[in-house]
Image (spheres, rainbow, N blue to C red):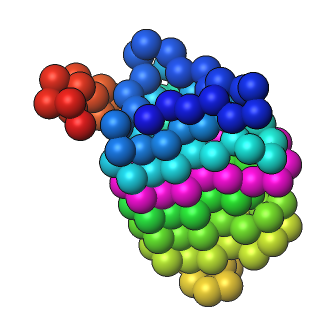
């Protein structure tokens, strides 16, 4: 569902997929070939949310913030993640049920582990693995992980069309 709020309508290009059971509202801009899966909420009521091309927002994730948020290209936001940070760089994975709190900045080619809680204001440098509660940098992304992040989200585009045909 795509809804205006306070006179602001989300920008959703034709190449993007927004599930009928997702909510994208207000000051949100989706890039080309983005996917917003069932139950996800992207709520641009307090501030702008700028999402670049080829970003996947998986089921039941929440993206919301009190300040402008920027999410880079080829990001995967896993199932049930809560994104309330300032920024996420390109080619980054936010794993299932991770939580990114106010003013955190996540670099490019990072992996934020499942269930991790990134503390308010934490700066995560490019190429970092972050795990735990609270999140701690566990080291650099390994070469095979970097390769996977580099490949991006192309496999999802065919799924968009299947979901559209099924009316999901």
Residue 15 visible in the current orientation: yes
x%, y% of residue 34?
46, 30
81 relative position to 118: left or right: left
Where is residue 59 drawn, in percent x and y?
37, 54
Residue 37 percent coordinates (x, y): 36, 44
Identify the image quadrant of residue 168: top left
Which x, y percent locates residue 160? 27, 28
Q: What residue do we see at 43% from left, 23% from top? A: 16
Seen in the picture, residue 119 relative to 45 is either above or below; the reply is below
Residue 164 or residue 124, whichever sits in front:
164
The reply to whether the magenta stretch includes residue 61 is: yes
Q: How many marks?
A: 0
Q: Residue furthest front?
A: 6
Q: Nearer the viewer, residue 104 or 92?
A: 104
Residue 94, can we see it?
no
Magenta stretch in the rendered image: 58-71
For residue 66, side relative to residue 70 (left or right):
right
In the depicted structure, whether residue 163 falls above or below residue 161: below
In front here: 121 or 83?
83
């Amino acid at each position: 569902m795509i809804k205006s709020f306070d006179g602001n309508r989300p920008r959703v290009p034709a190449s993007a997929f927004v599930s009928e059971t997702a909510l994208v509202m207000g000051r949100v801009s989706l890039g080309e070939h983005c996917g917003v899966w069932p139950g996800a909420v992207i709520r641009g009521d307090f501030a702008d949310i700028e999402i670049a091309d080829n970003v996947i927002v998986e089921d039941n994730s929440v993206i919301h913030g009190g300040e402008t948020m920027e999410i880079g290209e080829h990001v995967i936001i896993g199932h049930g993640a809560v994104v309330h940070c300032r920024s996420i760089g390109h080619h980054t994975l936010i794993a299932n049920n991770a939580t990114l709190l106010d003013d955190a900045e996540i670099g490019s080619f990072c992996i934020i582990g499942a269930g991790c809680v990134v503390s308010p204001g934490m700066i995560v440098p490019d190429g970092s693995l972050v795990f735990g509660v609270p999140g701690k940098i566990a080291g650099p992304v390994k070469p095979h992980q970097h390769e996977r992040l580099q490949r991006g989200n192309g496999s999802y585009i065919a799924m968009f069309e299947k979901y559209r045909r099924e009316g999901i």
